[in-house]
Image: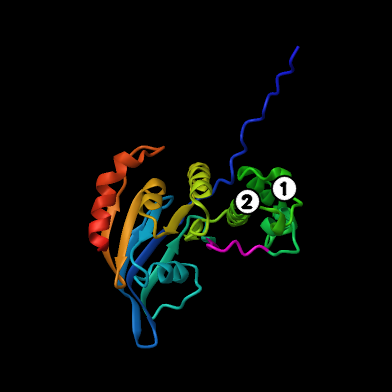
Amino acid sequence: MTAVQILPPPVPVLPARGASVHIRGLSVQYGQQTVLRDLSLDIAPGERVALVGASGGGKTTLLRALAGLTPISSGELRLDHPHGDARVRVMFQEDRLLPWLGALDNVSLGLGPQDRHHARTALNGVGLADRARTYPHELSGGQRQRVALARALAHRPALLLLDEPFGALDALTRAEMHRLLDTLLDDTAATTLLVTHDLDEALKLADRVLLLSGGVLADDLRVTAPRPRIRAELEPLRLSLEERLH
C-alpha cells in the first residue's frame, strides 16, 4: 500500500495593519536639480501601488523619501497608522544579505529575541523553511530575493517599499517571484509601494499605477482586473501607459 503524505496548510506570512500615506506639495532637490516637484498624493491603508516612469523621473527618490533615507526640501509627508508606529521596510534590487549569516539569521536581523518566531514564520511563508541555516552563496538568485522579502515581512511592516526587487532576475524566476509576492500580499494588509520599469509587472501586482515624469505625477490609473491577472486583459492599460511614457 502506498502511503499518502498529507501536507500541512501553508502558513500565512504575517498579518499587519497598513499605513495610510499623505503627501502634500512634496519637493526634493539635489543641489540645483529638482527631482520631485510639488507632488501631492494619498495612498489608502493596504493599497498596492506601483510607480513607473522613465529613469530620472523621481520614482526611487519618492520611495527613499518615504523610507526616511532622503530628506525632503519642502512640503509634507505623513504616515498614519492606528497604533501610531507605522513600521516601514524596504526591499532593494540587491538582496543585501550578510554573507556570514544563514538565511534565518539574515531574516532575524533587527528583531528582538521575543520576535524571532516572526522570522521563522516569514521564511516559511516564502518556502525556505528548510534553508534556515543555508548561507547566501549557497542559494540561487531567486532564493536570495525570497530571503530578502522574508526579512522585510518579518518586521510586520505597515508600509512595504519595493525598489525594483526583481529587476536582476531572469524571466522565469521573475514570474515565479510575481506569483509568490501576489500571494504574500494577500496574506498581509501592509500598504505596498513598488518601483518598477516593467509595465507588465506593475499591472500584474498593483491595484493602482502611478506614472512619474519629470518629478511630477503624470497619470494615476486604477487596475480593477481580478487576480490572477491575464496579460491580454491588461493590454489596453499597458498601451495607455506606453503612450504616456514615450
151 horizontally vs 202: left or right: right
Residue under the image location 36 percent in, 38 percent down: 230
Which residue in the structure is indicated by mark 2? 143
Q: Position of residue 209 (x, y in %)?
A: 33, 54
Residue under the image location 35 percent in, 84 percent down: 33
Which residue in the structure is indicated by mark 1? 131
**Occupied quadrant, residue 195:** bottom left
- Say if the magenta span includes residue 110: no
**Occupied quadrant, residue 71:** bottom left
246 horizontally vs 153: left or right: left
- Say if the magenta span includes residue 91: yes
Residue under the image location 43 percent in, 50 percent down: 46
Q: Position of residue 139 (x, y in %)?
A: 68, 53
**Occupied quadrant, residue 61:** bottom left
Q: Are marks 1 and 2 in contact (CB under 8 Å)?
A: yes
- Classify mark 1: residues with Cα within 10 Å, few (<14), some (14-19) or many (20+): some
